[in-house]
Amino acid sequence: MLCVILAGGLGTRISEETQEKPKPLVVIGGKPIIWHIMMIYSSQGFNDFLIAGGYKNEMLAPEIKKHLRHNSKINFEVLDTGLKTSTGGRIKKCMEHAGLPRILATYGDGLGNIKLKNLIELHEQNESIATLTAVRPPARFGRVVIQDNLVTHFGEKIQSDEGWINGGFFVLEKDLSNFISSDEMPLEQYPFSHLSSIGKLGAYKHEAFWQPMDTLREKQELEKLWQNNLAPWKIW
């Protein structure tokens, strides 16, 4: 099954790293994060990739090829989906380019030890048009419990307090394209909100590790995990 990786955004929230390169080429442990994402898929038997490029698109193929030079299993192609195209538009262009009934897809800046075959199995059981991986957001702030204007508990916030958010790692049917009307349409707005209203958006609950790389601090946290041989996404 083809895996699409959204790799065309500007990465403005981590501009310290993205002035000179696209966000998916930001390095964790000596390898760009897109390499780590590709290895998550490849380790579970999915080796064909279509990279949806945009910002500094020309840098993607040479860097990916350099880091995959010893891996003969993986095949990839970079598709220029446009500098200003949003996530929905990028997905639609990739679907039209590939011409397949179903694809896997994810963002180019998030890591997790997702069990992809379980995700696909749930998608098929639900007969969904799209299924997303629902994750617990990383707890970012200290948890404060207040009673009668006094703090009765102060400590680390836990992820289960945060509910569920969209963590990427999608299964998408070709019919999803029917709900994407323009290049500027984000996947996360009308397409998903409409599918949810008609009972065709599935959610695979992933309770284990997931971490985005939206900020320099998060990049440093991922680097620390890798350097200490504690990277939960390293399932190969």
Image (spheres, rainbow, N blue to C red):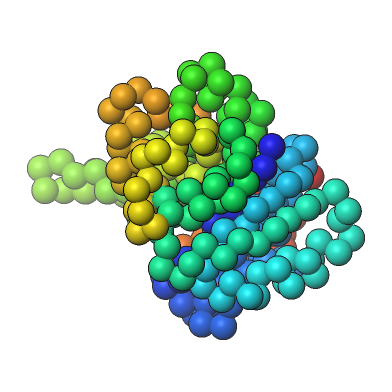
Q: Position of residue 195 (x, y in %)?
A: 35, 31
Can residue 219 be seen from the camera position used here? no
Q: Position of residue 220 (x, y in %)?
A: 57, 67
Q: Nearer the viewer, residue 100 or 135?
A: 100
Q: Position of residue 112 (x, y in %)?
A: 60, 45
Q: Using the image, determine if residue 199 lies above or below residue 152.
A: above
Q: Looking at the rendering, which quadrant does residue 28 occupy?
A: bottom right
At 62% across and 57% down in the image, what residue appears?
51
Question: In which quadrant will I find the C terminus?
Answer: top right
Q: Using the image, determine if residue 129 lies above or below residue 210.
A: above
Q: Nearer the viewer, residue 5 or 17?
A: 5
Q: Is residue 27 left or right of residue 235?
A: left
Residue that lies at the very extreme toward the left in this rendered image: 148
Q: Using the image, determine if residue 75 lies above or below residue 215.
A: above
Question: In which quadrant will I find the N terminus?
Answer: top right
Residue that lies at the very extreme toward the top in this rendered image: 125
At 42% across and 62% down in the image, what residue appears?
85
Q: Position of residue 150 (x, y in %)?
A: 16, 48
